[in-house]
Amino acid sequence: MSRRLLIGMFSDEHDILDVTKAARERGYRIVDVYAPYAVHGMDKAMGLPPSRLPWVCFLLGLSGAALKVWFEYWTTATDWPINVGGKPWDSLPAFVPITFEVMVLFAGISTVLAFFAVSGLVPGRSKQLIHPRSTNDRFALVLEQTDAAFDKAAARRLLEGHNAVEVLERVEEAR
Amino acid sequence: MNVPEMDFKMPVGLNGFLRGVTLAGALIVAAGLMWAPQRTWSSLLLAGYFLVCLGLAGVFFVATHYAAGAAWHVAFRRVPEAMTAILPYGAGILAAVFLFGSSLYPWTAEKAHGGFQAMWLNLPFFLSRAALYLTLWFLFARAIVRRSRLQDVTRAAMDTQKNARTSILFLVVFAVTFWLASFDWLMSLTPHWYSTIFGIYNFAGMFSSGLAVMILLVIWMRRAGPLRDFVNQEHLHDLGKLLFAFSTFWMYIWFSQYMLVWYANIPEETVYYVQRQHGFWLPLFILNFLLNWVVPFVVLLPTRTKRDAGILGKAALIVLLGRWLDIYLMTQPMSSGSAPRFGLWEIGAFTGACSLFVLIFLRAMRRALPVPMGDPMLAESLHYHN
């Protein structure tokens, strides 16, 4: 099924924040908002649920740290014990810096990979820009024209009332 | 925008209560100087250093934000500014300790070993250095706070720039003087033990406890009135992030100091930790990083708890207690011997110092508008998002 979209282009960060909030309050279905940079407060304006990425970060960080402690214990105390300066085999303080590094490595890389996976950013993905300037100096609010009752004129008025520089209509073919 | 009123909704008689507690603390300390002078000087050093650090954290916070051109903190900047008012009082307590209780420092009695140590650690030079550090900090704090209050009237953006310049100069001076001061005042209690990271360790503790106090005061000022319409959850969220970060930084530096000593295992260096790990010192030694890092780290990890004034305030209170314990562990084991001592003299200095701080803070807060209305970045601070 194809979707009919109504796209408002804005040139100011505050306009896009306000219009997104207003559109959500009036019950329009917001497909997405495109911005050249992260706009603070946008997730709240769009009514997005809290991100689940912190959980990926936390759990992978924890498992990275746990794995590393186990690995260091296994190498230095079990598999090939080496006496370093008369320290005990399981010298935990000596393991701390590496454990910390591996925890950060696991947490950081897994968060980035999870973000790529969730947003479908895989090699070979073709680019789909909503507007050529949405990566440069324009903010785009994309509304879906849900059904016949969708009052296009009212939606257009809303967008223009928030200083839209351009209002576009587009039909998106089903993928 | 209306100029906020100083409509404190404080409990009736709070000021009188604080005065009473401060006076009682002072009397206990005076009695302590008669009955147990060594012990009381030691807890006065702890109290004075604690208070000076809180004042310094206020200047440091304001100065870093001026230097970085930050806007988010403007809505509650009067709180760290008012915190700096404690500096002369803390300095006074420290001056009393250095002038009359210098027997705390072993190097005043014994013959110094090396040539450099004899040159560095002698009373006249020690006292003049302390006077220099405290005067510099006080003058910088006064200059920055004055200019900021002046801006309420002038409303000139130029004042922000002038303060940024003063702040940058302060930060450079502060980095060197605070590092040396922590060597002079705390590390020289064990004159044959050296740790070059000691100053950074003290800075980490100073700033994380300063943030904890700032959080408590901001929450209080928000509940009690003057900041009600100015401070929102976004400010608390960012303050919580800073507390989280600097409590972790403190742990990082704590461990950096500990690990090198542990690894090298040289008696001259390990003596510091041996002193703090035997007998009943060990539970305190462990409690130190539970309060200063483990609790705030676990509690403040989710977004929700940093935005909840109740939870954030409790975490800040725990960090504050941890800070007291941290300085206690840096100053007391040398004079206490095998078991920690905590009795009337310590409690008197502790409660006296806390109530003195609140008293001075409230007085400083009343002296100026509770929000810097003339700062051009105030509007941005009221509307920012995380």
Image: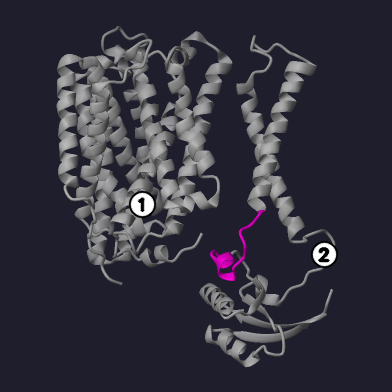
Check residue B219 in the rendering and tell me which mark sits there, or answer none: 1
Measured as percent of width and height from the top left, residue B267 is found at 49, 9
Check residue B130 in the rendering and tell me which mark sits there, or answer none: none
Q: Is residue B262 above or below residue B378?
A: above
Q: Residue furthest bottom?
A: A153
Q: Which of B225 and B72 is in front in this view?
A: B225
Measured as percent of width and height from the top left, residue B242 is found at 46, 46
Quick check: do tags 2 and 1 share a chain? no
Check residue A125 in the rendering and tell me which mark sits there, or answer none: 2
- From the viewer's perspective, is A113 left or right of B201? right
Q: Which of B273 and B283 is in front in this view?
A: B283
Chief secondary structure of the magenta span? loop
Q: In this view, does A172 lie above or below A52?
A: below
The image's colour scheme reads one colour
For label 2, the crowd category at 10 Å Cα-Cα, with few meaning under 14, some 14 to 19 and many 20 or more, is few
Residue at coordinates 38% horizontally, 53% vertically from top-left? B66
Look at the image and say whether residue B354 sits in the magenta stretch: no
- From the viewer's perspective, is A55 left or right of B26? right
Measured as percent of width and height from the top left, residue A44 is found at 56, 66
> Which type of secondary structure does the marked residue at label 2 adopt?
loop
Measured as percent of width and height from the top left, residue A91 is found at 64, 18
Chain of the residue displaying label 1: B
Q: Residue furthest top?
A: B111
Chain of the residue displaying label 2: A
Q: Three-letter amino acid code at disc 2?
A: Arg
Contact between marks 2 and 1 (CB within 8 A): the answer is no
Residue at coordinates 53% horizontally, 86% vertically from top-left? A161
Q: Three-letter amino acid code at disc 1?
A: Ile
Distance from Cα at disc 2 to Cα at disc 1: 49 Å
* Magenta highlight range: A39-52
